[in-house]
Image: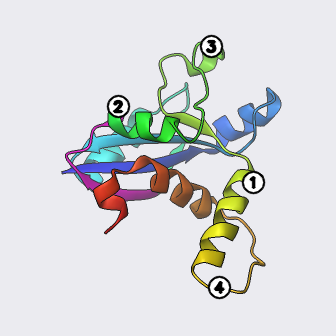
Amino acid sequence: MATLFVARSANLSKWASDVGLPKNIFKVGVVQGGADAVAAALATGWAAEKDWTLVKKVEVGDWTEEEALLRLGAKEKPVDPNYYPRLKGAAGIFKLTPTTVGNHMIIARAMAGNESLDFKLKVADYATYLITFAQPPQAASE
C-alpha cells in the first residue's frame, strides 16, 4: 500500500523566503508502506535539509510518486530544481501562495453550504490542498 504525504521544512521555508520564493514550500511524495516508510523518507531529507516534518498523509493504493507529481503538476507548478542549486535532485517541491489556497477553500466552503467564509490558513490547509490535487481520482471520491 502506497502512502501519499506532504512534508514541510522550517529551514527550507526560511531559505525560500530569502531567495524570493513564497515561504509556503512543501515536499509531496509517495512511499511504499505505512508510517515507518514515511518516517524513514523524512529522516533521509531533501534539499540539504534534515528537519522535515510530516504535515499530512493518506493511503493511495498502488499509486506511484511519478503519477502523483504529474497529477499535481497539472494544477500547481513545482519549483524547478535546476534553477535553484540547493534543490538539486529534489522532485516534488511545490510553492503555494495564500491566495491560491484561500480561494480554493472559499469555493469549497461555498459549495458545501458553509456561510462562514472567515478563516485563517493553517499549514494543514496547504497540505489538504496539495493532497486533494495529487491523489488519484478514485481515492479523492472516497
Residue 121 spot, x, y in % from top left? 71, 65
The structure residue drawn at horizontal position 39% and vertical position 57%, both measured from the top left corner, is 57
Q: Measure the alpha-carbon separation of dots 2 and 4.
A: 35 Å
What colour scheme was applied to this rendering of the protein? rainbow
Q: Secondary structure at mark 1?
A: helix
Residue type, mark 4 in image: Asn
Is residue 5 placed above or below 128 in the rendered structure?
above
Q: Measure the alpha-carbon separation of dots 3 and 2.
A: 22 Å
Q: If you read the primary sequence from the N terminus, does the residue marked by circle 3 or circle 1 appear first?
A: 3
Is 52 in front, or is 55?
Answer: 55
Residue type, mark 1 in image: Pro
Q: Which mark is residue 66?
A: 2
Q: Tell me, yes or no, whether the highlighted magenta stretch contains residue 58.
A: yes
Q: If you read the primary sequence from the N terminus, does the residue marked by circle 1 or circle 2 appear first?
A: 2
Mark 2 Cα shell of 10 Å, populated few (<14), some (14-19), many (≥20): few
Chain part drawn in magenta: 56-65
Q: Measure the alpha-carbon separation of dots 3 and 4.
A: 44 Å
**Pointer 1 residue:** 98
Q: Tell me, yes or no, whether the highlighted magenta stretch contains residue 85.
A: no
Q: Secondary structure at mark 2?
A: helix
**Pointer 4 residue:** 114
**Looking at the image, how many numbered discs can be counted on the residues?**
4
Residue type, mark 2 in image: Glu
Q: Which mark is residue 32?
A: none
Residue 8 spot, x, y in % from top left? 56, 46
Q: If you read the primary sequence from the N terminus, does the residue marked by circle 3 or circle 2 appear first?
A: 2
Q: If you read the primary sequence from the N terminus, does the residue marked by circle 3 or circle 4 appear first?
A: 3
The structure residue drawn at horizontal position 35% and vertical position 48%, both measured from the top left corner, is 39
Q: Quadrant of residue 126?
A: bottom right
